[in-house]
Image (cartoon, helix red, strand yellow):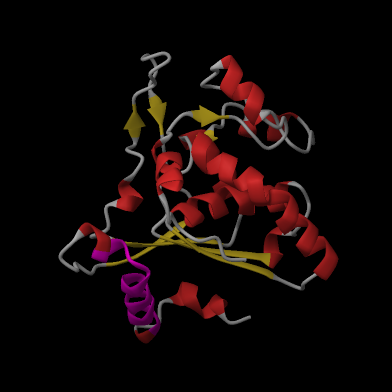
Amino acid sequence: ITIRGTSNLAEAIIDLNTDQVGNFAKKVDVDNYRKSNKFMVQLQDSNAKGSSDESLVNGAQVHYGFYVVWQSIQKSIEKYIEDVKPDYVVMGSHSLGAAVATIGGFELISNNIVKPDRLFNYTFAAPRSGNPKYAKVVDTKVPNLYRYFNTSDLIPTLPLAVMPNWSNVNPPYEFSHTGYPVHFTYNGGSVANNHSTGTYQKGIQYLIDNSNPTLSKLII
């Protein structure tokens, strides 16, 4: 499963919408969300398996724009997996797509579409996609999530760790990365070059040549 990065103005606007919403168990009605102007929606446990899960998931929030993109493709991806019944599901996505895949990989596991040990999620240049509680949920439930990034790339530093909440300035929105981090450094002389898929291809090749252990799982 590959989810591409930003390619037009409308998607750039999605990138910039750093409102946060709760998701997973209690699905957010996107239209109602827009009408009500609610910036924060309490998250509930998707599987209702007991207080331990509920306490873990409670308070997790995701980036509104990224979550809306995931919702737009979720049903088709889940149907495809259920129809094909693959032994493994491998996700590989860049930029906006990497953030969406981070959310999506968790939901595929949470909705019992894919078993945790059968999903391998490789993200490249992923922005932060949710708050610290969300990051803890994903790290707990998605064992094979690998986040590759160029230390010279601006995009993985966004949204900032603390962003203003224009509806209620106190508290602000907090964002955290999730997944096992793997980095390389390449400065191509511009923001675009440092973020390009070509640069990430070079970076991944460098990691392969230097026997990075996480890449051994790319070939199943």
Residue 128 shown left or right of residue 34 in the figure = left
Residue 201 included in the magenta stretch of the image: yes
Toward the viewer: 52 or 64?
64
Q: Quadrant of the N terminus?
A: bottom right
Q: Residue at x 72, y 47 (%)?
A: 110
Residue 17 shown left or right of residue 53 in the figure = left
Residue 140, horizontal then vertical, whole percent: 59, 47
Residue 162, horizontal then vertical, whole percent: 33, 31
Toward the viewer: 203 or 215?
203
Compared to residue 205, the image places residue 40 above or below, namely above
Compared to residue 16, the image places residue 88 above or below, namely below
Q: Please identify the quarter of the rendering in which residue 90 is found.
A: bottom right
Q: Residue at x 47, y 49 (%)?
A: 178
Find the magenta span and give its range: 193-208
Compared to residue 121, the image places residue 140 above or below, namely above
Residue 123, horizontal then vertical, whole percent: 48, 61
Residue 6 shown left or right of residue 58 in the figure = left
Residue 131 included in the magenta stretch of the image: no
Q: Quadrant of the C terminus?
A: bottom right
Q: Please identify the quarter of the rendering in which residue 52 is found.
A: top right
Q: Residue at x 76, y 47 (%)?
A: 111
Query: Which residue appears farthest toward the left when viewing the image?
Result: 189
Residue 211, horizontal then vertical, whole percent: 40, 82
Query: Total label count?
Result: 0
Toward the viewer: 99 or 5?
5
Examine the rendering and report whether any part of residue 177 can be seen. Answer: no
- Which secondary structure class fits the magenta region best? helix
Examine the rendering and report whether any part of residue 53 can be seen. Answer: yes
Residue 213 shown left or right of residue 115 in the figure = left
Q: Residue at x 34, y 44 (%)?
A: 158
Compared to residue 94, the image places residue 30 above or below, namely above
